[in-house]
Amino acid sequence: MANLRWLEAALPLGIIAGMLCVMGNGQYFIHKAVHGRPKHIGNDGWDVAMERRDKRSWRAATPREN
């Protein structure tokens, strides 16, 4: 029985790891539901401002249909 001491720690560690995965996936799906697209990892304020600028310039450059 002494060889299975690691088994005592495996269950709590498995529960902790599982809950971390659940929390991460929860954040992903909530963000996707709110914003309609997955979160871009590593975007800061500059990246967001450049994305908005690109969207504005793209809309201005495309011809509008009547």
Image (tube, helix red, strand yellow):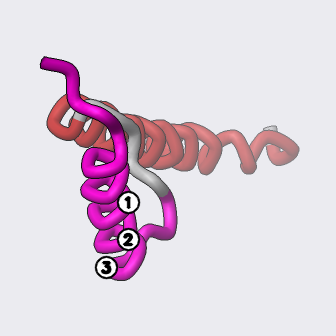
* Image height of 32 relative to 47, above or below: above
* Image height of 47 relative to 17, above or below: below
Front one among 25 and 6: 25
Near mark 1 (Cα within 10 A), the count class, few <14, some 14-19 or many ≥20, is few
**Magenta span has 5?**
no
Q: Reading the chain from its start, which is encountered first: label 2 or label 3?
A: 3
As shown in the figure, which amino acid type bears the numbered disc 3?
Gly
Element at label 2: helix
Asked if marks 2 and 1 touch (Cβ < 8 Å), the reply is yes
Q: Is residue 7 left or right of residue 17?
A: right
Mark on residue 50? 2
Query: Which residue is outermost to the bottom?
Result: 46
Which residue does the image show at 25% across and 56% down from the upper left? 56
As shown in the figure, which amino acid type bears the numbered disc 2?
Met
Q: Which residues are magenta?
A: 41-66
Element at label 3: helix
> How far is the residue under mark 3 from the one under mark 1?
14 Å
Element at label 1: helix
Near mark 2 (Cα within 10 A), the count class, few <14, some 14-19 or many ≥20, is few
Q: Position of residue 55 (x, y in %)?
A: 31, 52
Front one among 41 and 23: 41
Q: Position of residue 42 (x, y in %)?
A: 50, 69
> How far is the residue under mark 2 from the one under mark 1?
6 Å
Query: Which residue is the site of mark 3?
Result: 45
Query: Which residue is the site of mark 1?
Result: 54
Mark on residue 4? none
Front one among 66 and 33: 66
Q: Is residue 1 left or right of residue 36?
A: right
As shown in the figure, which amino acid type bears the numbered disc 1?
Asp
Query: Which residue is outermost to the top?
Result: 66
Figure disc tally: 3
Asked if marks 3 and 1 touch (Cβ < 8 Å), the reply is no
